[in-house]
Amino acid sequence: MPPLYAAYAMVTLTPMLVLGVPPVWTQPEQVHLSYTGVSGSMEVTWTTFNKTESTVEYSLWGGRLFDMTAKGNGTLFVDSGEEKRKMFIHRVILTGLKPASAYVYHCGSDAGWSDMFSFTALNDSTTFSPRFALYGDLGNENPQSLARLQKETQLGMYDVILHIGDFAYDMHEDNARIGDEFMRQIQSIAAYVPYMTCPGNHESAYNFSNYRNRFSMPGQTESLWYSWNLGPAHIISLSTEVYFYLIFGQELLFKQYEWLKKDLEEANMPENRAARPWIITMGHRPMYCSDDDQDDCTKFDSFVRLGRNDTKPSAPGLEDLFYHYGVDLELWAHEHTYERLWPVYRNKVCNGSTDQPYMNPKAPVHIITGSAGCREKTDRFNPNPKDWSAFRSTDYGYTRMQVVNTTHLYLEQVSDDQYGRVIDSIWLVKEKHGFSAWF
């Protein structure tokens, strides 16, 4: 072939090779992990914008690469915005994982594969001491804490992330493109450790459809409420939004309450409470807070705390329920601040003692951690807080928690404004758990 024709053939061949690259709408993105609640398993969730197969190839770290395969399903999700954008949410559950063993994986199909990620299968021992990062109210715009959380996650500092409501601000905006961008942002965290969630008020559009479809939490309630066990802890995720969006059906409020009661009863069976004595709840809107924004938690007759009398029948609140079943720690967000409370019940401080308030406290402990960073900035505090307010900060940041053993739990607050400095910490010590521990 003459040189001119040979050069022409090489030039014309390049576009043909490019045409063989899978189109972007079959490329997996927004990869995230979640715990199924079943020992030895992990769920992988991702998005494509065209229908493809749902496959995860994985292997033990250091073994033959991708020597195991799991299949799942892709579900069509049509956003309710004007464009009615379509996407496919893929879910695959990996089973038979060796507890505490490291794995590598990628997900997708022959039409396109994700990057390669890694995770550690959760340790199912009740003597395991899990480490958490927890926060709420993280947005696409001004995600102040995101970079630090990304780095710390990839350094292996956390076993689980708890995102306590309010994602992206807001996932449904721009025909759900904001939701896409947020899920891409958190992939560098959520593709490596289980990213466990609960709904917040910013997820309410179209009956919480973006939240319910994009995340994959345990149970059969579309991620609205569920529970799971890890180490010596039983963790409950709930929706505080059922108290505020009755337009979507007030029966959800009563359904969740009955589920909570049953779940707490089971968690308090002697053999269950002995194995996993810590009961920890996570819900978006707090029962108490000392911000100056007139939110529900600033009011004495808080819906979340005391319930609603304008429903038929009246809807019970959560404070008495959690107290009766000996909930140890209640995690909240919504307020764009950090606030630690003294042990409190019915607006009264119930410290363990003057010198050691968190040793054998006489009521649940509340932590509010909603300052991860979003476009609404941070909130302001009421200059005259109630007696139950122990420590407050308007710094951007997030909380770390470790359930050390059956008696000791550690919490600390990280200030992103102060370059990762720990600005608050406590040891919560419970030599006895359950309702009788209050007396």
Image (cartoon, rainbow, N blue to C red):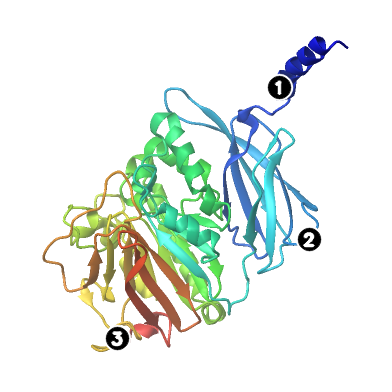
Q: Quadrant of the C terminus?
A: bottom left
Q: Amino acid at mark 2?
A: Gly
Q: Residues within 10 Å of mark 1 (few under 14, many from 20)?
A: few
Q: CA distance from mark 2 to mark 3?
A: 51 Å
Residue 176, image quadrant: top left
Tell me if label 1 and label 3 are in contact, CB under 8 Å: no
Residue type of the residue flagged with mark 1: Leu
Q: Is residue 111 left or right of residue 268?
A: right
Above or below, 161 against 412 in this view is above
State the residue at coordinates (30%, 50%): 312
Q: Amino acid at mark 3?
A: Gly
Q: Which residue does the numbered mark 1 point to in the structure image?
A: 19
**Horizontal side, residue 351 vs residue 436: left or right:** left
Give how far across and how far down residue 283 sits, in percent: 38, 58
Among the two numbered marks 1 and 2 on one chain, the one whose residue lies closer to the N terminus: 1
Judging by the rendered image, the residue that carries numbered circle 3 is: 352
**150 relative position to 303: left or right:** right
Mark 2 — residue? Answer: 63
Q: Provide the secondary structure element on which disc 3 rests.
A: loop
